[in-house]
Amino acid sequence: MSATVNSKDTGDESEVAILQALISAGYSVSIPFGDNDKYDLVVDDGESFQRVQCKTGWLEDECVRFKTCSKTTANGEVVRVDYEDEIEAFAVRCKDTGKVYWVPEEEAGQKNTYLRVVDPKIDHPSVNLATEYEFDGEIP
């Protein structure tokens, strides 16, 4: 059977990969009922709960790129809504690198975030190295 992959399928695959990584690391994870919340998962780290938005990243110009706002159409107009104050972190699965990344919301860009896979050898606050955000089983 040949299956057509669409954006919903891709998002579901990313969410499952992120769930697997979190559960394998020993975290308790809850999934909110319905699709009306800004977050996809609630992670219990034993001391607090973190609302997490799952995203799919892709490689572009030696960076893992992911969108940090939702885009919908209302009355024929494109509306972008960010996640500020609605989540604590983005969990990003990049199929190209085979990794999951954990990016605190306050460290993400307003529309997109780029995590550099190759170190550009410059020290600048806007350069985010992918290795610094790789989920290694510990939530920062």
Image (tube, rainbow, N blue to C red):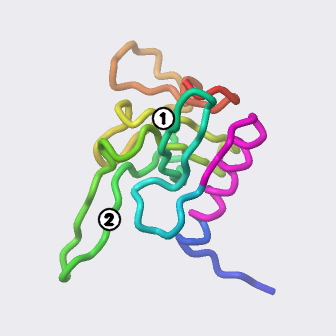
66 relative to 6, above or below: above
Q: Which mark is residue 71?
A: 2
Element carrying mark 1: strand
**On the rendered structure, is 113 left or right of 15?**
left
- Residue 7 visible in the displayed image: yes
Name, please, the residue furthest toward the top.
123
Determine which residue is flagged by label 1.
103
Q: Which residues are magenta?
A: 11-30
Name, please, the residue furthest toward the bottom.
1
Three-letter amino acid code at the position of disc 2 = Lys
**Residue plotted at (58% across, 41% down):** 43
88 relative to 13, above or below: above
Q: Quadrant of the C terminus?
A: top right
Q: Nearer the viewer, residue 94 or 46?
A: 46
30 relative to 122, above or below: below
**Residue plotted at (61% across, 71% down):** 9
Q: Nearer the viewer, residue 60 or 139?
A: 139
Whole-percent x and y of residue 27?
69, 37
Element carrying mark 2: strand
Marks 2 and 1, Cα distance to the nearest angstrom?
20 Å
